[in-house]
Image (cartoon, helix red, strand yellow):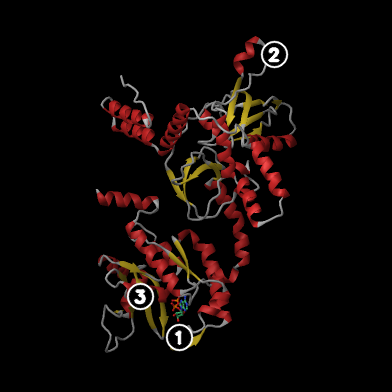
């Protein structure tokens, strides 16, 4: 038996004491972790703090000067509006209308009126139903708490009834445990749902989700559905978004208010894949328990497939001659990184069949190999990239990537996007940075003095960038991004060189020191390597 500690902070101490006493009776460490998480959670402790504070004032019995601030606010607003408009009055009016101030005043009123418990309306009369039918329906009264209800409804085509189509995980309806998918909605706040025409369903849907955002209660009369209730699984599937999604701009989503907005690169926890078309997800690490609707993988793939002809139509020549935004500054950024820490970074040594010059060292400037060996390696798919210049081959051999990695340094590789696919394996686990040009105006400014090769065949002659070069660079970057963006871990805009370099260096440091998201398949290899 635990005697409840009294005085300020009593509940907190009671919880710690409880946890301590229960620990000895716990069978598994899982139980212990669960209790620990629950009792030591931030939300619970904040609530307890509020409770303690309220207890303190209850003991002191202070009398509120005002029980309701509503009237005071209205009088003040009228008075301020009648004043000659000044910066201060409009600022004060703006402050008073802000949601946080409104919420604070609402809490003041609740405390002043000691209005802590929700007032539930009386249950509706049951006169429409016969005795033996009484068990077949359920009256559910929910107190609204500024949260959307977290449910979508649809019209059953065969019966015409309005049924609950989907319950959002962690939403008000889900947490109540009282409303389930498949339940037939007979009435909402006394308004019968029966015999509604399809045109009337949409406003009901909107009303259902909106009404739960105001305060008060909402009463549902439901006939439990025959569909078996699926156990709410707290699945731990994480996915990184490869596209931006705005539910408000999606005409197909069943209810825009329950959609989850996300940006490319966000990590989402998928909490339900039960529906083929609409999954439920949350942003990773988000404290909010409520999930939102996102298009399922199948739906998104179907959408992408439908979009593809349009993309091909827009960029036909670019897709054929895909070479990358030449001149964007990849070599320059790579050079700066290497110089910043040569002990930490390394680059690969290219292979060639040309003659070795006097001052050159084999394995340092190039790997000099015979034409026969080079061609044999081409056939053995050893070259990630290769080309011919003045009758000699030059190329990036996969063995030179392996050698660079054996040095236990971070290998900086500059490749065409299609090569990333070949490198995207558990062996190499690349971190892919896409260097993107800024706007044409910024290019004109920042590259005023920059020099590029006049043509790939004239190694020595250089020229300044032309407007056409900038346009090609931007078009090419757009084509690369639309085709390969799913392979990029980071997109760096190379506007100011020093800024781009610092951003990149900091990001590379971060991925080496902090944990970050990697494809599922790589995780297995890392786990088995660390066993
Ligand atoms: N942010 C920048 N501001 C000004 N000049 C830049 C910037 N980034 C790169 N440059 C200059 O632009 C020129 C081209 O850069 P760089 O050779 O690095 O491009 P690249 O992407 O490697 O091109 P390629 O793939 O054709 O070799 C160089 O003269 C470089 O110094």
**C-alpha distance separating marks 3 and 1:** 22 Å
* Residue denoted by label 2: 127
Residue appearing at x 55%, y 77% in the figure: 470
Residue 234 seen: yes
Q: Position of residue 12 (x, y in %)?
A: 36, 32
Mark 1 Cβ and ligand 1 under 8 Å apart:
no
Q: Position of residue 335 (x, y in %)?
A: 37, 76
Figure check: 368 above or below 226? below
Question: In the image shown, does 97 or 261 lie closer to the viewer?
Answer: 97
The mark nearer the N terminus, 1 or 2, is: 2
Residue appearing at x 34%, y 80% in the figure: 352
Q: Residues within 10 Å of mark 1 (few under 14, many from 20)?
A: few
Figure check: 468 above or below 300? below
Q: Is residue 421 left or right of residue 404?
A: right
**C-alpha distance separating marks 1 and 2:** 92 Å
Contact? badges 2 and 3 (CB < 8 Å) = no
Q: Position of residue 204 (x, y in %)?
A: 69, 34
* Residue denoted by label 1: 457
Q: Is residue 3 left or right of residue 224?
A: left
The mark nearer the N terminus, 2 or 3, is: 2
Find the residue positioned furthest to the top.
131
């Amino acid at each position: 038996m635990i005697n409840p500690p009294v005085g300020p902070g009593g509940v907190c101490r009671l919880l710690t004491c409880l946890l301590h006493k229960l620990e000895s009776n716990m069978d598994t460490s899982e139980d212990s972790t669960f209790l620990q998480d629950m009792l030591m959670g931030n939300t619970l402790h904040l609530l307890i703090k509020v409770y303690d504070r309220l207890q303190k004032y209850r003991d002191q019995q202070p009398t509120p000067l005002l029980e309701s601030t509503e009237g005071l606010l209205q009088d003040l607003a009228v008075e301020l509006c009648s004043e000659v408009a000044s910066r201060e009055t409009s600022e004060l009016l703006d402050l008073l209308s802000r949601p946080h101030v409104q919420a604070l005043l609402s809490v003041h009123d609740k405390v002043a009126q000691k209005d802590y418990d929700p007032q539930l309306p009386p249950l509706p009369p049951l006169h429409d139903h016969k005795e033996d039918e009484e068990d077949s329906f359920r009256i559910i009264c929910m107190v609204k708490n500024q949260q959307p209800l977290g449910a979508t409804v649809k019209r059953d085509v065969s019966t015409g009834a309005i049924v609950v189509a989907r319950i959002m995980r962690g939403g008000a309806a889900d947490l109540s445990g009282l409303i389930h998918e498949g339940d037939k909605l007979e009435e909402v706040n006394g308004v019968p749902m029966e015999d509604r025409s399809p045109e009337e369903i949409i406003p009901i849907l909107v009303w259902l989700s909106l009404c739960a955002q105001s305060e008060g209660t909402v009463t549902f009369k439901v006939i439990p559905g025959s569909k078996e209730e699926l156990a709410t699984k707290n699945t731990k599937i994480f996915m990184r978004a490869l596209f931006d999604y705005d539910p408000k701009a999606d005409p197909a989503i069943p209810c825009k208010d329950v959609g989850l907005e996300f940006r490319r690169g966000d990590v989402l926890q998928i909490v339900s894949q039960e529906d083929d078309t609409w999954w439920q997800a949350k942003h990773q690490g988000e404290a909010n328990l409520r999930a939102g609707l996102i298009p399922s993988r199948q739906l998104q793939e179907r959408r992408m497939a439908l979009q593809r002809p349009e993309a091909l139509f827009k960029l036909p020549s670019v897709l054929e001659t895909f070479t990358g935004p030449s001149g964007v500054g990849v070599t320059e950024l790579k050079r700066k990184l290497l110089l910043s820490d040569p002990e930490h970074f390394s680059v690969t040594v290219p292979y060639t069949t040309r003659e070795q010059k006097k001052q050159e060292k084999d394995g340092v400037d190039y790997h000099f190999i015979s034409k026969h060996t080079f061609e044999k390696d081409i056939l053995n798919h050893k070259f990630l990239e290769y080309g011919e210049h003045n009758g000699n081959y030059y190329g990036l051999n996969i063995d030179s990537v392996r050698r660079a990695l054996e040095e236990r340094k971070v290998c900086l590789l500059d490749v065409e996007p299609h090569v990333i696919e070949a490198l995207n394996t558990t062996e190499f686990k690349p971190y892919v940075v896409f260097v993107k040009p800024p706007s044409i105006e910024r290019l004109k400014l920042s590259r005023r003095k920059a020099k590029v090769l006049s043509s790939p065949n004239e190694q020595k002659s250089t020229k300044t960038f032309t407007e056409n070069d900038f346009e090609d660079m931007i078009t090419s970057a757009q084509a690369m991004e639309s085709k390969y963006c799913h392979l990029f871990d980071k997109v760096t805009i190379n506007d100011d060189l020093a800024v781009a370099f610092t951003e990149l260096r900091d990001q590379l440091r971060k991925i080496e020191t902090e944990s970050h998201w990697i494809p599922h398949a790589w995780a297995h290899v890392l786990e088995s390597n660390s066993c």
